[in-house]
Every structure is written in structure tokens, then in C-alpha cells.
Image (cartoon, rainbow, N blue to C red):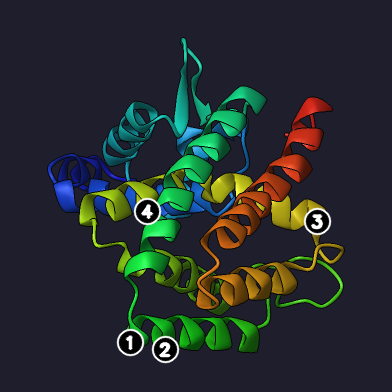
Amino acid sequence: MSQTASFSDARDPTLATAVHRRLREDILSGRLPPGQKLKLRDLAESYGAGASPMREALSKLAAEGLAERLEHRGFRVAAAAPAQLDGLIRSRVLVECAALRESIRRGDAAWEEALLLAEHRLNRAARSLDPHRFVANPEWEACHLRFHQALLAACGAPPLLAFCDRLREEARRYRALSNTLAYPGRDVAAEHAAIARATLDRNAEKAATLLAQHYERTGAFVGADLGRGGA
């Protein structure tokens, strides 16, 4: 890359933001797995950016906890630590189960219809693009997000929902690991169906229990692999 291009890149905050967004998505989706070294030259070629915006993006990822700065050796994707996973799952269970109970208490007919529609669309989407191994399907991922958001949508507490979204985002890379390890043995569709039925039956305790088990099952798959040093 020429000096002129590098100078232009360094002065372009939009480019650094775009690179950060793409790197962040690749880490959260599991395309860049935990522990992988983030070599500046390789990344610059892959993402079409100069060294300056790439360093800026990596520094921001490190501040967010998604990358680790290696002394005199650049960066790597943040490790997936078992203790971090356990804390994240416990936080999600505590927060989302509370939001789900309140959503069940406050939800009206329009909320029920929205949840039914979200579940229907999720069931219609293929979880993997390859029936023999896990290849993430973006359509399923989008429907999955909307289903979990629909469960909690009636709780009436936007700050709580925003916190749930943040925890869900942090959990994405662990879920990507779980999908690879558990597919096709895990019947995720049945888990979602059971959660939806209990929710629509207004059985708050059963729905919360099933939601907690749903997240804990993900943790069990990933935690066992992390314990073996797999990640």
C-alpha cells in the first residue's frame, strides 16, 4: 500500500469504524475463534485497510474485551475462559428470567401473536446451511434473535431489555462454539418450542426454568470443551 493511501486511511475515521465493525462481527460469530492471533499485515490484506485504522480497530476491540494486546507481539482474539462463560450464563439466567416473568405478567394478545410469529419464522429457517455439519445460516440467526427478543418484549422495562441485548451479544461467540460442538445432536427447535408453549400458557415458573436450562445446556457443551483446552 502506498504512503498516500496509508496517510489517507489514518485520517479516515469512517474506515476505522467499518473495520472495527467487521472484526467485531467476525469475533462474535466465531469466524475468528478464541486465541487466534490477529496479525496486522494479514488483517490489512483481508479487510482492505491500512495499518493505522487496523490498529485503531484492534485497540477498540481490546478495550471492549474481545481482543487481547500481547506485549511486543500485537493482538489476539480474547480467550474463552470457563469462569467468564459461567458468569455470563448466570447473569443471563438471572436477568432474562426476571424479564420473561414480567413479560408473561404484562403481555397482551398482540405480544402473544408476535411471539407465535417469531417462533413460526424460526422453525421455517434451516439452522445450518449444510445438513452434515454446522454452517451458520444468517437467516436462522436473525430469526433466533427475534424469537428471544419477542419472549421478553412485553416486560415494559427498556433499560432491562437493553442489558439483556448486551449480554446476548457477549454470549454470541460462546454460542458459535456450542453450535459447532453440539450440531446435529442437540434439538434446539424442541427447546425453543417448549419455552414458547410455557410462555404462551402463562406458566412463568416453567418458562423461566426452561429458558435457564436452554442457556445452561449451551454452557455445558462449551464448558466441557474449554475444560479440555479445546478453545
Which numbered disc, 1 or 4, marks the residue closer to the eye? 1
For label 3, the residue is 182
Hey, which quadrant is residue 100 in on the image?
bottom left
Which numbered disc, 4 or 2, marks the residue closer to the eye? 2
For label 4, the residue is 165
Residue 157: percent from the left, percent from the top? 24, 56
Residue 46: percent from the left, percent from the top? 49, 52
Seen at 55% across and 54% down, the residue is 29
Residue 137 seen anywhere in this rendered image of the structure: no
| The C terminus: image quadrant | top right
What residue type is disc 2 on?
Answer: Glu
Tell me if label 2 and label 1 are in contact, CB under 8 Å. yes
- Earlier in the chain: of badge 1 and badge 3, it is 1
- Earlier in the chain: of badge 1 and badge 4, it is 1
* CA–CA distance in space, label 1 to label 4: 22 Å
Seen at 61% across and 44% down, the residue is 174
* CA–CA distance in space, label 2 to label 1: 5 Å
Residue 216: percent from the left, percent from the top? 67, 45
Left or right placement of residue 213 versus residue 200 in this view: right
For label 1, the residue is 110
- Earlier in the chain: of badge 3 and badge 2, it is 2
Mark 2, secondary structure of its residue: helix
Label at residue 113 = 2
Tell me if label 1 and label 4 are in contact, CB under 8 Å. no
